[in-house]
Image (cartoon, rainbow, N blue to C red):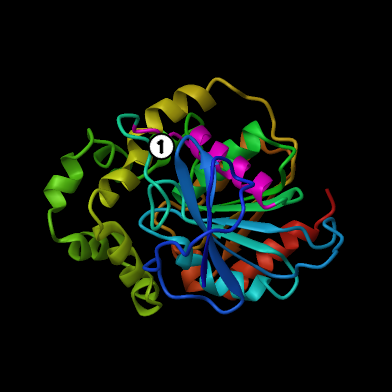
Amino acid sequence: MLVLVAGAGPRSTAGPTGPADCGADVPGLTRMTVAVGHGVVLHVAVGGPTGPTDPRASPPVVLLHGFPETWRTWRSVATDLLTDHRVVVPDLRGVGCSSVAPAGTDAYDKRTLGGDLAELAGALDLPPAVVVGHDMGAMTAFAWARTRPDQVERLVLSGGGIPGHGLAELGPEHLTTFAAPPGVVAARVGDDVRGFLARFVGDPAVTASGSLDDAVRAYSRPGRLDAALGQYRALARDAAVEGPDPTPLPMPVTTIEGEGAGVPGISTRTVRALAPRLREVVVPAAGHYVQEDRPADVAAAIRAAGSAQP
């Protein structure tokens, strides 16, 4: 079921049903859309306990996808966490059934995306949360934690580095090639979105789980591949903002990395100098898409991050 939250601000009331082709429903999660300002509307799945809970014992968990992913990359992890945590799983700006950036702006820098999430948290009345980001989502999670530490109780990063803190030196080549001007990569891909994404992902678990099909459906929509690549085009701007700031993060940070990831330990290596309370988790028999390869282990690591003493 998809409920539209429409109107001028993020605290608006329920309205007509929104777009339905956003991936199959996940039991226990209700899908909705939330206006977060500047004409942007985020598609989000929410579930878990709704009654009074002690947020210190069972804080909400926000799960942020990377590229080429949608909210559904987290479905197995989210289903596990639903038993004892409120779970929030959005499509980021430009992806899936969330809005693209306002016309003419290419506004996909990570602090802007983090601002979307800050508005989303306010609309949902979330207490300070465990914020988990994978791949490009890790960069947005970091930006959100940097700008709104009052909303981010714990930060969990997986498979994504921090712009301006070693990402350019350690990151894979596609961080540069995907940052071509708007339209260039999408024109090169043409109609072969499935072939492009399948070659890029290269993880049998992503194909077997149906996440590749989800991504093909999401990124084949007109303009959507180019919108998603806006996060890569923004990396130089992100680095210019984050690089000069050596201030330590005030919250505990956990990194979750697959032992077989293409760039081993990229989250750990780029956040270490900024995270005085850093805990590292390496998941065996897992690659870059650790949430697909070993979802139970990832859910356990997120629970541990949420319950660890500050």
Does residue 288 show up magenta in the picture? no
Instruction: Give neighbour class at mark 1: few <14, some 14-19, many 20+ (Cα, 10 Å).
Output: many
Q: Secondary structure at mark 1?
A: loop
- At x 67%, y 35%, the residue is 148
Q: Nearer the viewer, residue 43 or 158?
A: 43
Q: Is residue 61 above or below residue 164?
A: below
Give the x, y percent position of residue 215. Answer: 33, 64
- At x 48%, y 75%, the residue is 25
Q: Which residues are magenta?
A: 106-124
- At x 54%, y 40%, the residue is 8
Does residue 122 show up magenta in the picture? yes
Q: Is residue 235 above or below residue 97?
A: above
Residue identifier under label 1 = 108
- At x 69%, y 70%, the residue is 48
Q: Main secondary structure of the magenta part?
A: helix
Give the x, y percent position of residue 137. Answer: 49, 49
Give the x, y percent position of residue 275. Answer: 68, 38
